[in-house]
Image (spheres, helix red, strand yellow):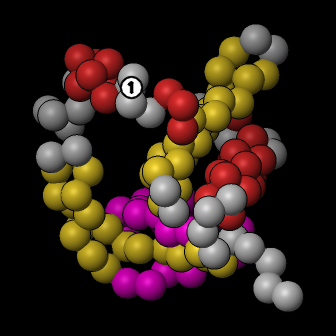
């Protein structure tokens, strides 16, 4: 947490703007999804928008973005984030096991979730 300061977010934001889609409700940003290659890098939904269709819409949009260039997407989630893991699993993502995730200078033990994002013919 000490490394994720407001200044850190301001530093990292410019390189992600063109890869980020925001969800807006009543003029307020209630969530976002950021894609990096075949990775669904970040998914966030504000507390006020949880339990709505916002998260599902954002992850669906992210999957569509990944599918433009890749057959399969992946994401990292901390094992203790049970709520997120349940959500991803309901959306068809599969836990492929533990790995060391390097996130902007921080290494975190995460679970790698994967999902085919292109329809098979």
Q: Position of residue 6 (x, y in %)?
A: 28, 19
Say whether residue 95 is left or right of residue 2. right
Say whether residue 111 is left or right of residue 49. left
Residue 12: image quadrant is top left
Residue occupied by mark 1 = 13
Q: Position of residue 111 (x, y in %)?
A: 37, 73
Residue 2: image quadrant is top left
Q: Nearer the viewer, residue 50 or 3?
A: 3
Q: Position of residue 59 (x, y in %)?
A: 67, 53
Relative vertical location of residue 48 with respect to residue 28 in this rendering, above or below: below
Relative vertical location of residue 75 with respect to residue 34 in this rendering, above or below: below
Q: Residue furthest top?
A: 27
Whether residue 99 can be seen here: yes
Count all numbered tags in the image, as a single digit: 1
Whether residue 63 can be seen here: no
Numbered range of the magenta stretch: 73-97
Say whether residue 109 is left or right of residue 15. left
Say whether residue 13 is left or right of residue 100. right
Considering the numbered disc 1 on the image, is that residue within a helix, a strand or a loop? loop
Residue drawn at x 41%, y 74% as measured from the top left: 112
Give neighbour class at mark 1: few <14, some 14-19, many 20+ (Cα, 10 Å). Answer: few
Residue drawn at x 27%, y 22% as measured from the top left: 11
Asked if the stretch drawn in magenta spans residue 74, the answer is: yes
Q: Residue furthest right?
A: 121
Asked if the stretch drawn in magenta spans residue 52, the answer is: no
Q: Nearer the viewer, residue 74 or 18?
A: 18
Relative vertical location of residue 68 with respect to residue 49 in this rendering, above or below: below
Residue drawn at x 53%, y 48% as measured from the top left: 35
Q: Nearer the viewer, residue 93 or 62?
A: 62
Q: Position of residue 41 (x, y in %)?
A: 46, 51
Q: Quarter holding the C terminus?
A: bottom right
Q: Quarter holding the N terminus?
A: top left
């Amino acid at each position: 947490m000490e490394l994720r300061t407001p200044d850190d977010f301001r530093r990292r934001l410019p390189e992600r703007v063109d890869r980020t889609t925001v969800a807006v409700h009543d003029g307020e940003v209630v969530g976002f999804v950021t894609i990096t290659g075949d990775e669904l890098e970040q998914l966030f939904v504000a507390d006020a928008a949880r339990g709505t269709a916002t998260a599902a819409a954002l992850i669906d949009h992210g999957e569509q973005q990944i599918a433009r260039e890749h057959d399969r997407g992946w994401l990292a989630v901390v094992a203790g984030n049970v709520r997120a893991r349940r959500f991803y699993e309901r959306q068809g993502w599969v836990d492929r096991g533990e790995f060391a995730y390097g996130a902007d200078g921080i290494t975190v033990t995460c679970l790698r979730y994967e999902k085919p994002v292109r329809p098979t013919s």
